[in-house]
Amino acid sequence: MTTPLLDRTASTAHPVLGILAERWSPRAYDADTPTDEAKLASALEAARWSPSANNSQPWRFIVARRGTELHRGIVDALMGFNQAWAGNAGALIVAVAETANAEGVAYSHAVYDLRQAAAHLSVQAHHDGLVVHQMSGFDPAAISALVGLEERFTPTTVIALGELGDAAALPEPLQEREIAPRVRRPLSETVVASA
């Protein structure tokens, strides 16, 4: 039995680009189809060209394709129910903030810039027909040890990227989350001051 594909387009209060309204974060990944390398490269290229304070580009990405030791190591570093589904993604990408340069000068904007890069990656991937889900539930120290990161590099997010799979293949509690209505708090509660 397969789960019917639902329209996941956000019901926005104001007009936004279609690509933004349509983007969502599924947990069901096709465990058999390899990630299209050209689409993966385009997603990483979009991240490369995201805004950066003083063009410092304080981000790095660890890219692990399903079936590799690196991919297995990243799955092992995931926490909780993320391990139940993320291993099916064609690629796991760890977003890494460069918190200081090689001389030890801190980049106060590193995490902000990295998250913009991850957002650009996410939108480009969605545009190209891939799905992306970003996770904070992982062990950063385990990732750092896995690839030998210097202390000035901080893993901040693991990004599952690949082809959409069947939600019916997920554990039951996750199936419910996969098809639950998409909601956000009202814009009036998000904007805390406006003049």
Image (tube, rainbow, N blue to C red):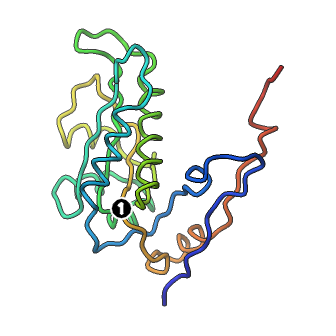
Q: Residue at x 53, y 77 (%)?
A: 172
List x then y, in percent, for residue 127.
46, 54
The one of 162 and 176 positioned closer to us in this rendering: 162
Residue placed furthest toward the bottom: 1
Q: Residue at x 47, y 33 (%)?
A: 116
Q: Where 66 sits versus 185, above or below? A: below
List x then y, in percent, for residue 15.
72, 47
Left or right: 41, with 106 as reference point: left
Q: Where 33 sits versus 49, above or below? A: below
Left or right: 37, with 129 as reference point: left
Q: Please give the residue where the numbered disc 1 appears in the rendered image.
A: 162
List x then y, in percent, for residue 48.
33, 33
Q: Where 161 sits versus 188, above or below? A: below
- Asked which quadrant contains residue 55, the reply is top left
Left or right: 102, with 176 as reference point: left
Left or right: 91, with 123 as reference point: left
- Asked which quadrant contains residue 62, the reply is top left
Q: Where 75 sits versus 106, above or below? A: below
List x then y, in percent, for residue 79.
40, 54
Residue type at numbered disc 1: Gly
